[in-house]
Amino acid sequence: MFDQAKMVMQMRKLQKELARQQIEVSAGPDGAVLVTITGEQKIKKISIKPEAVDTGNIGELEGWIETAIKEAISKSQQVAAEKMRPVMGKLGNLGL
């Protein structure tokens, strides 16, 4: 029982850490698009450099945004997996 309570506390601590973790990913020339996402995969901010955008080619901008968001989500998943690895390994010891 004590191990389970300890595990729950570790998971809560991990969730708080992931909520504070911020990951930034850029896409396009000279970082035209910058996406900031938390370790919980919540988008915090999307920044666009106006001088890098060709208003005649909005499709290009949309592609940069999509690329940056996909990469940010992938990186946040990697960060979460790395942080959870030690805790998840302990679940086997609990018979889960």
Image (cartoon, helix red, strand yellow):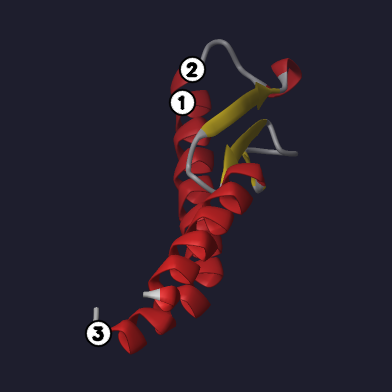
Q: Between tags 3 and 2, which lies in front?
A: 3
Location of mark 3 (residue)? 95
Give the CA distance from mark 3 to mark 2: 53 Å
Q: Which mark is residue 62?
A: 1
Locate residue 73, reporting x and y percent. 47, 48
Q: Which residue is mark 2?
A: 58
Nearest the viewer among 29 and 56 is 29
Q: Is residue 12 above or below residue 35?
A: below
Q: Quadrant of residue 4?
A: bottom left
Q: Quadrant of the N terminus?
A: bottom left
Amino acid type, label 1: Glu
Q: Residues within 10 Å of mark 1 (few under 14, many from 20)?
A: few
Q: Residue at x 44, y 35 (%)?
A: 66
Identify the amino acid type marked 2: Ile
Q: Residue at x 44, y 45 (%)?
A: 70
Dot 2, how many residues are within 10 Å of its Cα: few (below 14), some (14-19), or many (20+)? few
Q: Work out whether 51 lies above or below 13.
A: above
Q: Looking at this view, is 38 or 17 the one in front?
A: 17
Q: Position of residue 61 (x, y in %)?
A: 53, 25
Which amino acid, mark 3?
Gly
Looking at the image, tell me whether mark 3 or mark 2 is earlier in sequence order.
2
User: Label 1 vs label 2: CA separation?
Assistant: 6 Å
